[in-house]
Image: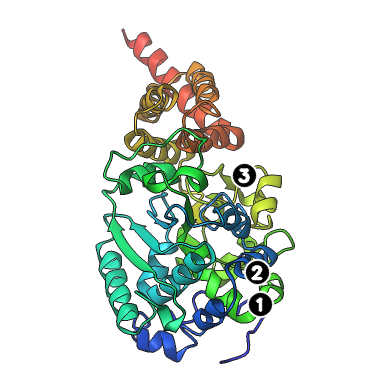
């Protein structure tokens, strides 16, 4: 097996992506695949949980909760079934890291699932894939079949006495199912709506049994940690947010795509990798982690993109989906499009989100259409205040982020629309 390298631009999670047939088990095994699993099975579950804790690996789905701590919540006894659920319902606008990973290197996820399941004494794993990602769904199914045939799944894995089965499940295309408890309801065959917590999934999750829900990128990181150690993992990134990360760059960049870099990398560095701004038109605003994260401006080019750095600058890291917008884009128009998405995807369970997103979308549509008033700005901020922290789940908080941050940094653009409307009304009145 090759020695681990720690150069900040040395691919880790993406190292197999450019190989011919990267999704096949043959390519995966040729490039150190399934070498971490035998090591893991020789250790105890407690040792694996301690290893992941020590590595500092934090959830890559947006919340950033320490993965090892989350694993430790699973009961030590096996009186009840334990379930591992992988959240692959990637639906955040701009987010495109998990689906490419599963398409290019599905076996890294499969191996990570087996190791994580063993660490949590789980014998059943479910990978919940976004329903529209049909090719990804098929590729994962094929990877599961290959792993079964090679003895990495099923009964008595590698003669260890450990049994594990993986089910790949296609969702119905609801953004709300990215919320872990709504995902569990959907997986059980019910309408995807968030559950009241507590109880938390670790106590009563899938089928009311102890359950851990992890993101794809989180689980795919585990084999590398088992192979190379926690100290190696911590040499990348920053002290409180270690390890490599896949950043999705979309929008007005020369080379949009997925870029792997250490946690704490800045947009300035990522733009260098992506060839800079498209056609040389200057940056105007951008999202650090998808549309549900408060936007940044050109003044935030050097903000460290990790969990602490993003929060200190006034946003959150989210899914590291960087949507890049140049100076040709209207902020009110972009905010309107995002708000229309959240209105459409609200599950309707709670009043603040159901009613609030509807009226926010209506006000923004009227404003962008040239019929807004200055009072609409204050009205929107008031509605946002009634949604934020008061909705049943985080969808409501995410829905107001573009509006609040858009008005914070670009209030003059919203006012300009209102002034234009006022001038047109006065002109029309003078003609009458």
Q: Which mark is residue 315?
A: 3
Residue that badge 1 annotates:
229
Query: Given this view, does label 1 or label 2 mark the residue nearer the observer?
Result: 2
Tag 3, which secondary structure?
loop
Q: Is residue 277 visible?
A: no
User: Is 212 drawn above or below residue 153 in the view shown?
Assistant: above
Select label 1 or label 3 by which is in front.
1
| Residue found at the far top of this picture | 432
User: What residue is drawn where x is 65% and y is 53%?
Assistant: 307
Q: Nearer the viewer, residue 120 or 190?
A: 120
The image quarter in which residue 87 lies: bottom left
- Image quarter (top left, top right, bottom left or bottom right) of the C terminus: top left
Residue 24 horizontal/vertical position (percent): 34, 83
CA distance for labels 1 and 2: 8 Å
- The alpha-carbon separation of the residues under discs 1 and 3 comes to 31 Å
Q: Residue furthest front?
A: 79
In the shown orientation, is residue 53 left or right of residue 119?
Answer: right
Furthest residue toward right: 239
Q: Nearer the viewer, residue 224 or 200?
A: 200
Point out the image quarter for the N terminus.
bottom right
- Mark drawn on residue 51: 2
């Amino acid at each position: 097996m090759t020695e681990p390298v720690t150069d900040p631009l040395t691919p880790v999670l993406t190292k197999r992506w450019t190989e011919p047939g990267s999704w096949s088990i043959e390519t995966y095994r040729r490039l150190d695949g399934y070498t971490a699993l035998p090591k893991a099975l020789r250790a105890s579950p407690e040792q694996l949980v301690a290893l992941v804790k020590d590595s500092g690996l934090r959830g890559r789905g947006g919340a950033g909760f320490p993965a090892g701590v989350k694993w430790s919540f699973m009961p030590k006894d096996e009186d009840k079934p334990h379930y591992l659920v992988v959240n692959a319902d990637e639906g955040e606008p701009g987010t495109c890291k998990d689906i490419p990973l599963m398409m290019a290197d599905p076996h890294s996820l499969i191996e990570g699932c087996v190791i994580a399941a063993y660490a949590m004494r789980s014998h059943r794993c479910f990978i919940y894939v976004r329903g529209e990602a049909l090719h990804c769904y098929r590729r994962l199914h094929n990877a599961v079949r290959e792993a079964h045939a090679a003895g990495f799944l099923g009964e008595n894995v590698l003669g260890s006495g450990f049994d594990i089965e993986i089910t790949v499940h296609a969702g119905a295309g609801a953004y709300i199912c990215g919320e872990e408890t709504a995902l569990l309801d959907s997986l059980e065959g019910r309408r995807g709506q968030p559950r009241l917590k507590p109880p938390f999934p670790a106590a009563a999750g899938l089928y009311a049994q102890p359950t851990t829900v992890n993101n794809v990128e989180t689980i795919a990181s585990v084999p590398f940690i088992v192979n190379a150690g926690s100290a190696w993992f911590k040499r990348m990134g920053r002290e409180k947010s270690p390890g490599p990360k896949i950043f999705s760059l979309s929008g007005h960049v020369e080379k949009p795509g997925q870029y792997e870099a250490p946690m704490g990398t800045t947009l300035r560095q990522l733009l260098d990798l992506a060839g800079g701004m498209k056609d040389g038109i200057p940056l105007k605003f951008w999202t650090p982690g998808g549309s549900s994260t408060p936007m940044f401006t050109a003044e935030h080019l050097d903000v460290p993109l990790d969990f602490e750095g993003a929060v200190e600058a006034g946003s959150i890291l989210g899914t590291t989906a960087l949507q890049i917008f140049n100076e040709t884009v209207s902020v009110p128009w972009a905010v309107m499009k995002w708000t229309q998405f959240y209105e459409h995807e609200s599950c309707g369970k709670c009043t603040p989100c159901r009613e609030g997103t509807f009226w926010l979308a209506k006000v923004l549509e009227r404003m962008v259409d040239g019929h807004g008033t200055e009072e609409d700005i204050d009205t929107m901020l008031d509605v946002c205040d009634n949604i934020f922290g008061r909705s049943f789940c985080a969808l409501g908080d995410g829905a107001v982020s573009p509006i609040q941050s858009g008005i914070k940094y670009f209030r003059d653009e919203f006012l300009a629309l209102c002034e234009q409307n006022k001038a047109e009304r006065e002109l029309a009145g003078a003609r009458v």
